[in-house]
Amino acid sequence: MAINYLTTANTFQQWLIGTQDLITVANNLTDNISGTFYANTNLVVGNTLNVVGDTTISGNLTVSGNIVLDTIGFDDINANGSINVGNTLFVTGNSTFSNANVTNTLTANVAQITTATITTATITTGNITTGNIITLAVTTGNITTGNITSLSATTGNITTGNISGTLTVTGNSTFSNANVTNTLTANIAQITTANIVSLIGTSNTAIYAAISVVEAAAVALAIALG
């Protein structure tokens, strides 16, 4: 309630009441005597605003500058609506997302993914336990179980994985047990021990030429021996 203005025409009682009203407002502002200080106006702070206790904002909080968090810790941040970050969000600690929808690009230098359905991912170092991945480029990664359409890996350990598309490996590959049901094409191959059903291309031509030389030599030796 607004305090009435006083003039020289007011009585001493009116001056006393006005002065008491001003004292009540000042005490509520500094000592919180009544429990609540209500200001029905815009509050502008020209210098630094320090809040020692809790702060509750029932409306919208609009910040035109930066929010700097120094030594403030959060237990939980609950947002009923959406949190939109128009620029860059830096998180120096751990982050847990129960449901994260990334419409643009997610770049993770070090990532541990438990269960995920990934359309396109580029991971420098990552451990993927279970994932349905359409396109994955991994520099160093361990994949336990995954259904992968296309995988391009520099260094990676795949325990169980179904790759329906193209597997591109730029380095060396070691297979303890490889079962190829369709076609295995090797431009340059060194095979130590293998059960081979058929060979095509330059490998087949080279082997056939070598066998022909051996057969010709055997025939010539047989003729010479009579």
Image: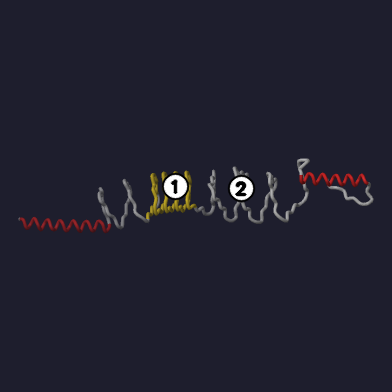
Secondary structure type for disc 1:
strand
Q: Position of residue 46 (x, y in %)?
A: 73, 56
According to the image, label 2 marks what residue?
72
Q: Position of residue 90 (x, y in %)?
A: 56, 53
Between residue 4 and residue 140, name the one nearer to us.
Answer: 4
- For mark 1, does the 10 Å Cα neighbourhood hold few (<14), some (14 to 19), or many (20 or more) residues? some
- Of mark 1 and mark 2, the one earlier in the sequence is 2
Q: Is residue 35 above or below residue 84?
A: above
Give the Cα separation between the discs numbered 1 and 2: 31 Å
Question: Which mark identifies residue 163?
Answer: none
Q: Is residue 158 left or right of residue 102?
A: left
Coloration mode = secondary structure
Residue at the location (42% across, 54% down)?
139
Between residue 47 and residue 127, name the one nearer to us.
Answer: 47
According to the image, label 1 marks what residue?
127
All told, the count of numbered labels is: 2
Marks 1/2 in contact by CB < 8 Å: the verdict is no
Residue type beneath disc 1: Asn
Residue at the location (15% across, 56% down)?
215
